[in-house]
Image: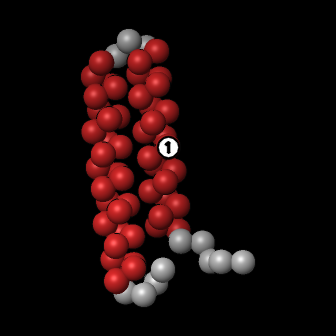
């Protein structure tokens, strides 16, 4: 069994939560909430890809 990469798991959970937030904001008819969650998912996924690249360069993946 492979070891869990905790930072990547945290980023995945945060991204999924942001996607759920978009759905909740749309159902509440909150355009600012939807835009905020959309920006959050872009930032979180960018940080996740950056972390993955660093881990790959360091030989941790």
What crowding class fits label 1: few (fewer than 14 Cα within 10 Å), some (14-19), or many (20 or more)?
Answer: few
Residue 32, located in which quarter of the rendered image? Answer: top left
Q: Residue furthest bottom?
A: 59
Q: Residue furthest right?
A: 1
Figure disc tally:
1
Task: Please name the colour scheme applied to the rendered image.
Answer: secondary structure
Residue 2, located in which quarter of the rendered image? Answer: bottom right
Q: Is residue 8 above or below residue 55?
A: above
Q: Is residue 36 above or below residue 44?
A: above
Task: Please give the residue where the numbered disc 1 appears in the rendered image.
Answer: 16
Residue 28, located in which quarter of the rendered image? Answer: top left
Residue 1 position within the rendered picture, expressed as x and y whole percent measured from the top left: 72, 78
Q: Nearer the viewer, residue 55 or 32?
A: 55
- Asked whether, in this view, residue 27 is left or right of residue 49, the answer is right
Q: Is residue 50 above or below residue 33?
A: below
Residue 39 position within the rendered picture, expressed as x and y whole percent measured from the top left: 27, 39
**Residue depicted at x 30% and y 18%:** 31
Residue 25 position within the rendered picture, expressed as x and y whole percent measured from the top left: 41, 21
**Residue depicted at x 39% and y 79%:** 56
Residue 54 position within the rendered picture, expressed as x and y whole percent measured from the top left: 33, 77
**Residue depicted at x 39% and y 70%:** 52
Tag 1's secondary structure?
A: helix
**Residue depicted at x 44% and y 56%:** 11
């Amino acid at each position: 069994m492979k070891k869990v990469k905790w930072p990547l798991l945290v980023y995945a959970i945060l991204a999924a939560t942001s996607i759920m937030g978009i759905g909740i904001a749309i159902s509440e008819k909150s355009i600012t909430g939807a835009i905020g969650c959309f920006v959050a998912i872009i930032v979180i996924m960018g940080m996740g890809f950056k972390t993955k690249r660093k881990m790959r360069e360091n030989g941790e993946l």
